[in-house]
Amino acid sequence: MPFDCRQAGHTNRGLNDADVAHTLDRLHRDAGRRDARVFAKALPSVIAGKFIGRSTFQAAEPYLNEAYIPVSREFGRFMYLAAVSRGAKNIVEFGSSYGISSIYLAAAARETGGFFTGTEKDTAKAQIALENLKEAGLSRWSDIREGDALESLAPMEGPVDFLFLDGWKELYIPILELMEPKLASGAVIFADNIHSFKKTLKPFVERVCDATAGYESVVLKIGSGVCMSVWRGGRGDQG
């Protein structure tokens, strides 16, 4: 039986803040119920897809816009602790969806005296994410930029201390390349769904695992696979 590290009595700090904890509890419950309905609806397509060589995600993709598919509590807490330990003051997320992961990262930004910036292409999801951040009491330390992340993040000034990649998988490398000149030395980068989109994200993993590319990286067996990287500088800066 896994340990539950949530404290029984909420203190006014971090993830134990009453508003943050209450909002996360509600969202994780809502996500579990909605995603169960979505995947039940997608199941016939998934089964049929097996016979023509389609992956589960390829077959279910038409239904996924209705789903939360959030980070787990454990991974959310892990990112929060990583950002706080790094003292990250400029935290960026690609692909905020309904804002569950955003709450973990915005809570870290409040703790460090920094700011969290999320991105979401879907207008309705962006507005819901902002409402969820407000419910958690984190509006002062956060924002969601609506629209194409390659455009909305382009004017952002560095240094960026923490970057979470969880949007459209084909854009991981373009977003990373956009953000690279803005990354602080020692910046932490998390990229989700490494195993569930193994073929699509193989070039991304190869890039951040290339010793000459300026990163030190490890792929972790968390959820559907997480790549954690630390930025050490540009190409040719090592040695």
Image (tube, rainbow, N blue to C red):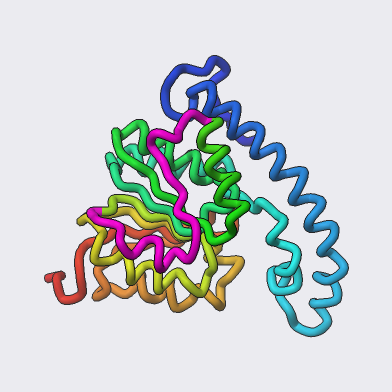
Q: In this view, does 111 lie above or below 182?
A: above
Magenta-span inclusion, residue 150: yes
Question: Residue 149, percent across and down?
Answer: 44, 64
105 or 126: nearer the eye?
126
Tell how many labels.
0
- Tell me where residue 83 sits by quadrant: top left
Residue at 44 percent across and 19 percent down: it is 12
Question: Residue 142, percent across and down?
Answer: 41, 41
171 or 119: nearer the eye?
119
Which region of the structure is painted magenta? 136-159
Q: In this view, does 60 lie above or below 2?
A: below
Residue 75 in view, yes or no: no
Residue at 33 percent across and 53 percent down: it is 188
Question: Residue 215, percent across and down?
Answer: 29, 65
Hey, which residue is sitting farthest left in the picture? 239
Q: Quick one: quadrant of the C terminus?
A: bottom left
Magenta-span inclusion, residue 110: no
- Tell me where residue 44 sits by quadrant: bottom right
Q: Quick one: quadrant of the N terminus?
A: top right
Residue 182 in view, yes or no: yes
Residue at 51 percent across and 37 percent down: it is 133
209 or 233: nearer the eye?
233
Question: Residue 171, percent across and down?
Answer: 47, 72
Hey, which residue is sitting farthest top in the picture? 9
Hey, which residue is sitting farthest bottom in the picture? 52
127 or 177: nearer the eye?
127
Q: Is residue 235 above or below residue 231?
A: below
Residue at 37 percent across and 55 percent down: it is 163
Q: Image check: 96 left or right of 161?
A: right
